[in-house]
């Protein structure tokens, strides 16, 4: 992901949490905020978070890597002007498979109405 497609500042995360909507699945939670004004035409931005209840930075980082990879594999076309925070909601003992995360992420994003599955032609263009 390019830097312009990432949520990086604490202020951006806080704004999405406070003003956005929340979708919850078994393994993943999504906070979604549609931007307005001049920022509405910019590309979608995504951030990844994990609850600190694990108390182990190694496990939290592994969860974030799994979430990033699941998001990459979803092959979704996200509506421009949307900020998304993807949160891992599982415990260390009950870790999901990557395919479960991909399927749930696709379902949550399409149900929220902020994305659709890319056609094969769009996938080839984005890979180059």
Image: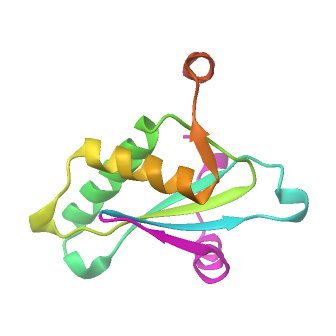
* Residue 58 picture location, percent across and down: 20, 62
Number of numbered labels in the structure image: 0
Q: Indicate whether 58 appears above or below 73.
A: below
Looking at the rendering, the stretch of residues picked out in magenta corresponds to: 1-26
Residue sitting at x 48%, y 56% = 108
Question: Residue at the location (59% across, 53% down)?
Answer: 6
Q: Residue furthest left?
A: 93
Q: Please give left or right for residue 41 compared with residue 94 in the image.
A: right
Across and down, in percent, residue 84 comes to 58, 61
Measuring 57% from the left and 30% from the top, which residue is drawn there?
118
Quadrant occupied by the N terminus: top right
Taking the magenta stretch, the answer to whether it contains residue 20 is: yes
The residue under the point 18% across, 70% down is: 91
Indicate the position of residue 23 as horizontal and vertical percent values: 49, 69
Which residue is more in the foreground, 118 or 36? 118
> Which residue in the rendered view is the most extreme toward the right?
38
- Of the pair 125 and 2, the residue shown nearer to us: 125
Residue 2, can we see it? Answer: no
Q: Residue furthest front?
A: 111
Nearest the eye: 50 or 78: 78
Is residue 41 covered in magenta? no
Instruction: Locate residue 128: give its quadrant.
Output: top right
- The image shows residue 64 at horizontal and vertical percentages of 34, 57
């Amino acid at each position: 992901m390019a830097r312009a497609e990432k949520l990086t500042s604490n202020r951006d995360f806080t704004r999405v949490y406070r003003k956005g909507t929340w979708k919850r699945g078994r393994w993943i939670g999504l906070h979604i905020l549609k931007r307005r004004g001049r920022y509405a035409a910019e590309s979608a931005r995504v951030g990844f978070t994990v609850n600190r209840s694990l108390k182990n930075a190694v496990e939290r980082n592994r969860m974030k890597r799994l979430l990033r990879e699941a998001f990459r594999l979803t092959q979704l076309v996200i509506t421009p002007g949307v900020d998304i925070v993807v949160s891992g909601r599982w415990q260390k003992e009950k870790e999901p498979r990557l395919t479960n995360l991909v399927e749930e992420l696709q379902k949550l994003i399409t149900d929220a109405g902020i994305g659709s599955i890319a056609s094969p032609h769009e996938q080839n263009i984005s890979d180059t």
